[in-house]
Image: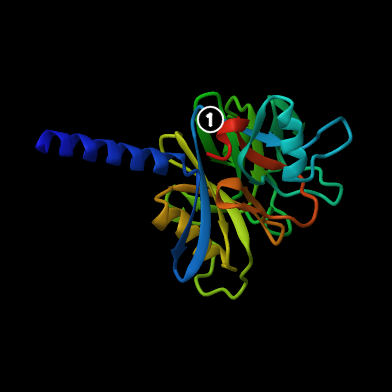
């Protein structure tokens, strides 16, 4: 009887762990704010999407899902993947499927992007990297996909030096952090307005990530079908998303 009980317990634990592993996106509370974070692992089919043709941008999660359907695939989750100009072309470095479509910018400039240090999120064949832009320009890794944004939120475990803890500049913001071994990329969006310092704390102190990069604010959007969530609004520029077989996307 005890053996049967232990066996049933082991099955229950395995089932619960499998369910947790399948939950790519989770909503949590931290510092009196709500955040949703989604995780990709090295080896996952994580991609950047911009143009559906030579001149037409995807612009939305729905358009990407429609295109992926021809492959028998869908987005498990996605969010806006980088800053963009009014024509939705990327600001700074942008690499998609190994092709550089926009060059890296290493000079200081106006706005959040130019608040140095900024950085580059890179998807390599077997790992993720998040590198300060000037360091990236000096020794670029072999990125299949990459997007530059700024400012850096967390740099080697330290907050960006220009952040103010009690700043009243609060927005819905999104960003990405990478684990020290390069095996995990965690994308997060604030569900309530936060300042840069609060957002950086979420990546470093809650998620335990020593490198994190701000992606954008105001236009921040998340597509997370498992949470029955898909944000809509203005057409987007670059979009980052994890691709899975269609039958797995809603499991």
As drawn, is 214 to the left or to the right of 2? right
* SS state under label 1: loop
Residue drawn 68% across and 55% down?
A: 231
Q: Position of residue 41 (x, y in %)?
A: 48, 34
Say how the picture is coloured. Answer: rainbow
Residue drawn 67% across and 26% down?
A: 72
**Residue that extends furthest to the left in the rendered view of this protein:** 2
Residue closest to the eye, 63 or 40: 63
Q: Which residue is mark 1?
A: 44
Residue 103 seen in the current view: no
Tag count in the figure? 1
As drawn, is 85 to the left or to the right of 218? right
Q: Position of residue 64 (x, y in %)?
A: 74, 37
Q: Residues within 10 Å of mark 1 (few under 14, many from 20)?
A: some
Q: Is residue 227 above or below residue 90?
A: below
Q: Is residue 6 above or below residue 195?
A: above
Q: Is residue 86 above or below residue 141?
A: below
Quadrant of the image containing the N terminus: top left
Residue 95 seen in the current view: yes
Q: Position of residue 230 (x, y in %)?
A: 66, 52
As drawn, is 27 to the left or to the right of 116? left
As drawn, is 149 to the left or to the right of 128? right
Residue drawn 62% across and 31% down?
A: 246
**Residue that extends furthest to the front in the rendered view of this protein:** 1
Residue closest to the eye, 34 or 121: 34
Q: Position of residue 100 (x, y in %)?
A: 73, 29
Residue drawn 76% across and 35% down?
A: 66
Residue closest to the eye, 120 or 89: 89
């Amino acid at each position: 009887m005890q053996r049967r009980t232990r066996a049933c317990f082991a099955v229950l634990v395995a089932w619960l762990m499998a369910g947790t592993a399948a939950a790519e996106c989770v909503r949590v509370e931290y510092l009196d704010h709500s955040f949703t974070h989604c995780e990709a692992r090295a080896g996952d089919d994580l991609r950047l999407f911009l143009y559906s043709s030579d001149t037409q941008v995807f612009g939305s999660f729905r358009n990407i899902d429609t295109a992926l359907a021809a492959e028998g695939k869908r987005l498990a989750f996605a969010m806006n993947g980088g800053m963009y100009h009014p024509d939705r072309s990327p600001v700074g470095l942008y690499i998609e499927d190994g092709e550089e479509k926009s060059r890296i910018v290493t000079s200081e400039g106006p706005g959040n992007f130019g608040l140095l240090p900024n950085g580059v999120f890179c998807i390599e064949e077997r790992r993720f990297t998040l590198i300060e832009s000037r360091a990236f320009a000096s020794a670029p890794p072999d990125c299949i996909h990459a997007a530059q944004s700024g400012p850096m939120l967390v740099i080697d475990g330290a907050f960006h030096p220009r952040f103010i803890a009690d700043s009243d500049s609060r927005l819905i913001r999104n960003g990405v952090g990478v684990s020290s071994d390069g095996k995990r990329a965690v994308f997060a969006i604030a569900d309530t307005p936060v300042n840069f310092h609060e957002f950086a704390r979420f990546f470093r102190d809650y998620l335990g990530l020593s490198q994190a990069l701000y992606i954008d604010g105001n236009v921040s959007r998340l597509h997370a079908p498992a949470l029955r969530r898909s944000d809509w609004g203005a057409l987007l520029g670059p979009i980052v998303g994890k691709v899975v077989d269609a039958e797995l996307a809603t499991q």
